[in-house]
Image (spheres, rainbow, N blue to C red):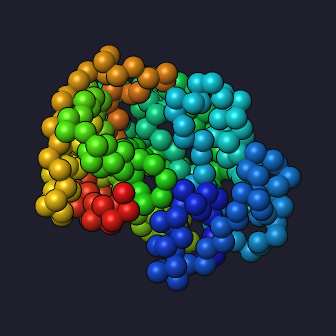
Amino acid sequence: MKILLIGGTGQVGSEILFVAKNNNVKCISPSSSELDITNRASVNSIIENNLPLDFVVNASAYTAVDKAEDEQELAAKINRDGPQYLAEACAKYKIPLLHISTDYVFDGCADTPYKETDSTHPLGVYGMTKLEGEQAIRECLPEHIILRTAWVYGAQGNNFIKTMLRLGQQRPELKVVCDQFGCPTAAVDIAITIINVISQMHTQAKGRWGTYHYCSTGSTHWADFAQAIFAEAVSVNSDYPSVKVIPIPSSEYPTKATRPGYSVLDCSKIEQSFTITPTMWQSSLQRYIPNILKNI
């Protein structure tokens, strides 16, 4: 199987490259100098020059949630226009597309896990542009998989775990929000799921195109997640300092963009359609912490 990966340097994209290699999947990942996803001609050219392709995977996105409120045009170009250009090119050359989306398409007002069919209502520019990207794909290309995920962390880039571990070495106490709930999800688990899905679709699609949710099982809030991070850090390295986590409401930690208060996703559809069982978030955290501690 041969795939074209957009966004191979990001948290999920870099893990896709690794997982693909270990599963004998040929993965071509153009650099930003080779591909401008906001340019229709550039998108068409990169796909045409790499034919034949079995799948295109889009792991690129504008993810600076607060900054997006001030850079709405740029966020829209990357999160809305880019996916549209990919879907148009994929339709032209009859190539299926897997696109990564986000829990931010929801407003977080639910109290039960979000299903793929639940109404969307993004609270900010990031969520709105990601939703518009989803809608563009649906309109252009029936042969698509949209994979929504949440609370992603990985080896590349910045994320909550890295921030906590770094601050924990500098401060004895940290105030962390306790009224936003979600499912911390390792980028490598998302990558494994993506390669699994496209491998199954490559051999037998059977009408499984559409939107799916994938995140780790079990939910938590940021303050409890922080406490789990520090507990795991101490278990790995006894010299890591003791850190007191002080839970606070979101009102005490204002941000430019409003975050969903509840980002738990129902993953039963992907379990039933692809026999994929998400991992517990605590198990993934245990695997992740030792490697991160070496590099902070």
Which percent across, then down, holds residue 156? 48, 58
Q: Nearer the viewer, residue 259 or 266?
A: 259
Q: Nearer the viewer, residue 35 or 280?
A: 35
* Left-right relation of 159 to 28: left
Which percent across, then down, holds residue 209? 54, 54
- Residue 164 in sight here: no
Which residue is most to the front? 170
**Quadrant assignment, res 172:** top left
- Residue 3 in sight here: yes
230 relative to 24, above or below: above
* Left-right relation of 76 to 124: right
* Left-right relation of 220 to 194: left
Residue drawn at x 44%, y 30% is 106
Q: Nearer the viewer, residue 236 or 70?
A: 236
Residue drawn at x 46%, y 80% is 22
15 relative to 247, above or below: below
Quadrant (top left, top right, bottom left, bottom right) of the N terminus: bottom right
